[in-house]
């Protein structure tokens, strides 16, 4: 064995690498498959391809994969647009050939889109019996999400995260009432139902309705009615700043679900605070406004509709008791 590798041997390695690439890509005939098989080291072969599944630790598994590959790509022919090969000696009886292949599908009829691959490879050859044997091949494609001069796909990751945040923002926006930015009816129901499934118990469910709101719309107009709705939403968020789901159920009807257990005394204190705060806020209006509240205690096993119906009945009782009050 030579102590140093001469250029003739390296040139042979480059030519063999080129012939293997052409045999595999351009004309995968039975004759070329036999040529590829004859160039491989039967004892030490390992190959890694461009597909995630293309990891072969021996010649038998490679040819199983090659057979499936040929069946899938039947009728597909590639042309090599550009190729580059560079040899590197490793000791006295082995060498590397590194390079690039730019290939494109060559269809038998026009197609709007063509398969095109810009690939890189590393081949390890071992010298035996006066010829080179392919011992290892690693064929890869660049990460298209990774921009030039980036060492990991930072830009694509940032763009994906931004798109995810935007999607989440749209999802959150879809849950909000367009006027008040409280939860809309569907979102309120969804979140309360989820809390009940998780076992919420001893929480409080409030139904609230504005008193004399129709008079505002009839005498002062709908724009003023919209301002009243928006202002009442602010009061609700002031009285229930945390540990509560607050929603607009439609028109001048609102609902609140305490996300933590709330005693009867605390629930009534919240109802009083809401009524008094709203009455104080509305004292200077041309139309006397108040709010009525129905409260129901959350018991395990009740559904959203059970609570909604019971709280609505309590609210109706408050209306019958003179408005601007609460009932259970």
Image: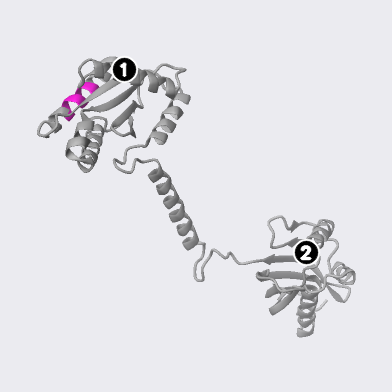
Q: Which numbered disc, 1 or 2, marks the residue that appears first in the sequence?
A: 2
Place of residue 319 in the rendered image (x, y in percent of width and height, measured from the top left): 25, 19
In the image, the segment drawn in magenta is 270-278
Left or right: 75 in relation to 226 = right
Residue 223 shown in magenta:
no
At label 2, counting other C-alpha atoms closer than 10 Å, the crowd grade (few under 14, some 14-19, many 20 or more) is few
Residue at the extreme left: 284
Mark yes or no: residue 60 visible.
yes
At label 1, counting other C-alpha atoms closer than 10 Å, the crowd grade (few under 14, some 14-19, many 20 or more) is many
Residue at 86% in and 68% down: 33
Q: Is residue 293 above or below residue 101?
A: above
Q: Which residue is mark 2?
A: 73
Residue at the extreme front: 218
Between the residue at mark 1 and the residue at mark 2, the CA separation in whole angstroms equals: 71 Å
What is the quadrant of residue 327 in the picture? Answer: top left
What is the quadrant of residue 260 in the picture? Answer: top left
- The label nearer to you, 1 versus 2, is 1
Query: Which residue is at the front of the view, 120 or 314?
Result: 314
Place of residue 155 in the rendered image (x, y in percent of width and height, measured from the top left): 47, 62
Q: Secondary structure at mark 1?
A: helix
Q: Is residue 26 above or below residue 245?
A: below
Query: Which residue is at the front of the view, 134 or 164?
Result: 164
Q: Which residue is mark 1?
A: 314
Residue at the extreme bottom: 7
Which quadrant of the figure contains the C terminus? top left
Residue at 13% in and 29% down: 280
């Amino acid at each position: 064995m030579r102590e140093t590798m001469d250029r003739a041997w390296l040139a042979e390695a480059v030519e063999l690498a080129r012939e293997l690439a052409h045999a595999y890509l351009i004309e995968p005939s039975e004759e070329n498959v036999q040529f590829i098989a004859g160039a491989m080291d039967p004892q030490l072969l390992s190959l890694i391809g461009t597909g995630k599944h293309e990891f072969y630790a021996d010649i038998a598994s490679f040819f199983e994969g090659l057979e499936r590959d040929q069946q899938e790509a039947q009728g597909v022919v590639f042309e090599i647009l550009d190729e580059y090969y560079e040899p590197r000696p490793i000791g006295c009886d082995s060498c590397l050939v590194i390079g690039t292949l730019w290939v494109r599908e060559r269809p038998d009829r026009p197609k709007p889109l063509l398969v095109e691959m810009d690939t890189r490879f590393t081949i390890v050859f071992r010298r035996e019996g006066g010829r080179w044997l392919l011992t290892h091949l690693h064929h890869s494609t660049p990460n298209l999400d990774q921009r030039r001069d980036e060492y990991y796909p930072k830009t694509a990751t940032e763009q994906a995260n931004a798109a995810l945040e935007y999607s989440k923002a749209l999802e959150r926006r879809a849950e909000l009432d367009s006027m008040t930015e409280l939860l809309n009816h569907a979102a309120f129901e969804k979140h309360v139902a989820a809390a009940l499934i998780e076992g919420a118990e001893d929480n409080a469910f409030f139904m609230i309705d504005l008193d004399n709101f129709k008079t505002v719309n009839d005498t002062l107009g709908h724009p003023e009615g919209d301002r009243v709705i928006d202002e009442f939403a602010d009061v609700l968020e002031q009285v229930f700043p945390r540990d509560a789901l607050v929603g607009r159920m439609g028109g001048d009807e609102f609902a609140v679900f305490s996300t933590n257990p709330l005693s009867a005394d605390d629930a009534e204190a919240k109802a009083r605070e809401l009524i008094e705060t709203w009455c104080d806020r509305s004292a200077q209006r041309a139309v006397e406004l108040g709010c009525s509240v129905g409260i129901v205690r959350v018991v395990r096993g009740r559904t959203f509709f059970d609570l909604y119906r019971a709280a609505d009945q309590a609210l109706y009782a408050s209306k019958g008791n003179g408005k601007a009050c609460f009932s259970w």
